[in-house]
């Protein structure tokens, strides 16, 4: 049985999306799987090139998505209900964040192009430039900060 996605569902409010539509909103960039450092005083979030141990660096997808919480209990599960609390923690290009903020999807988004590789072709994904967290001690993550805004 295949699940039908409504036409241009991504333009609807996040709370109106079905579970399959919610999942389809992900652009597959992998940025949310980058480890982040948050300044306790300012709340500023800095992304690192250090990726979650479950991120597949080639596909930019979680290698164990359906059971990821068994391996990474601290993984944040995005829902329409928690977006207001965590949107600031998501990359500025994230479709969930953009739609939460009432903004349209970018032209390179796979839903806009019909091509799942458009996120990679546009240079938006983390493909090829992450390092696995098991190779970098947490006290060295600051050495892997990403300077540009994600």
Image: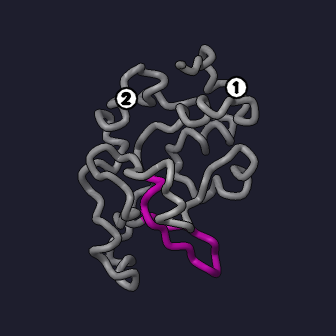
Magenta-drawn segment? 31-47
Residue 9 figure quarter: top right
- Regarding residue 146, the answer to whether it shows in the image is no
Q: Position of residue 88 (x, y in %)?
A: 63, 57
* Residue at the spot 71% in from the left edge and 43% down from the top edge: 80
Instruction: Name the residue furthest bottom.
Output: 139
* Residue at the spot 36% in from the left edge and 45% down from the top edge: 125
* Residue at the spot 33% in from the left edge and 35% down from the top edge: 122
Q: Position of residue 56 (x, y in %)?
A: 32, 52
Q: Nearer the viewer, residue 87 or 6?
A: 6
Q: Is residue 104 left or right of residue 109?
A: right
Q: Position of residue 17 (x, y in %)?
A: 69, 30
- The quarter in which the N terminus is drawn is top right
Q: Is residue 40 left or right of residue 93?
A: right
Instruction: Name the residue furthest top.
Output: 7
Residue holding disc 2: 116
Q: Secondary structure at mark 1?
A: loop
Rendered view: 88 above or below 97:
below
* Residue at the spot 48% in from the left edge and 25% down from the top edge: 111
Residue holding disc 1: 12
**Residue 74 lies within the magenta run:** no
For the residues marked 1 and 2, what is the alpha-carbon distance in whole angstroms? 21 Å
């Amino acid at each position: 049985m295949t699940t039908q996605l409504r036409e241009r569902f991504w333009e609807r409010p996040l709370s109106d999306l079905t579970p399959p539509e919610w999942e389809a909103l992900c652009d597959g960039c992998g940025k949310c799987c980058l480890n982040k450092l948050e300044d306790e005083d300012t709340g500023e979030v800095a992304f690192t090139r250090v990726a979650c141990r479950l991120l597949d660096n080639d596909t930019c997808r979680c290698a164990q998505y359906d059971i990821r919480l068994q391996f990474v209990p601290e993984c944040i599960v995005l829902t329409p209900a928690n977006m207001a609390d965590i949107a600031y923690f998501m990359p500025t290009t994230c479709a969930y964040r953009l739609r939460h903020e009432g903004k349209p999807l970018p032209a390179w988004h796979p839903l806009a192009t019909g091509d799942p590789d458009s996120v990679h072709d546009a240079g938006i994904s983390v493909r090829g430039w992450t390092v696995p967290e098991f190779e970098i001690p947490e006290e060295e993550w600051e050495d892997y900060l990403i300077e540009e805004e994600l």
